[in-house]
Image (cartoon, rainbow, N blue to C red):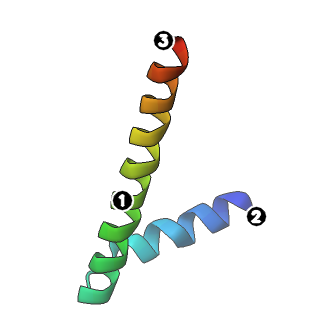
Amino acid sequence: MKMNTAASIGSSKRRLSSRGLGSAFREQKARLYIIRRCVVMLLCWHD
C-alpha cells in the first residue's frame, strides 16, 4: 500500500501544468525555508 501511494505521488508530480508547477515551486520554497531555519537554529545553538 505504501509503494502504491509513492507511485501515485510520483505520477502526479510528472504532470506538467501551470498550477502544478506553481504548487511544486511553493512546496520546494517552503521546504528550503524550513531547512534554512533549522540550520540557523543548530548553528546558533552551538554558540
In the rendered structure, find residue 28 and report the number of the disc placed on it. 1
How far apart are the alpha carbons under marks 2 and 3?
Answer: 45 Å
**Residue 17 point in image, percent of width and height:** 26, 87
Looking at the picture, does residue 42 appear above or below residue 46? below
Comparing labels 2 and 3, the label whose residue is closer to the camera: 3
Q: Residues within 10 Å of mark 3 (few under 14, many from 20)?
A: few
Q: Quadrant of residue 12?
A: bottom left
Q: Quadrant of the N terminus?
A: bottom right
**Residue 34 point in image, percent of width and height:** 46, 48
Q: In the rendered picture of this protein, how many numbered marks are placed on residues?
A: 3
Q: Amino acid at mark 2?
A: Met
Q: Amino acid at mark 1?
A: Gln
Q: Nearer the viewer, residue 36 or 25?
A: 36
Looking at the picture, does residue 19 appear above or below residue 2? below
Which residue sits at x=64%, y=67%? 5
For label 3, the residue is 47
Looking at the picture, does residue 42 appear above or below residue 2? above
Which residue sits at x=37%, y=49%? 32
N-term-proximal mark, 2 vs 1:
2
In the rendered structure, find residue 1 and report the number of the disc placed on it. 2
Q: Residues within 10 Å of mark 2 (few under 14, many from 20)?
A: few
Q: Secondary structure at mark 3?
A: loop
N-term-proximal mark, 2 vs 3:
2
Looking at the picture, does residue 20 appear above or below residue 27? below
How far apart are the alpha carbons under marks 2 and 1?
Answer: 26 Å
Q: Secondary structure at mark 1?
A: helix
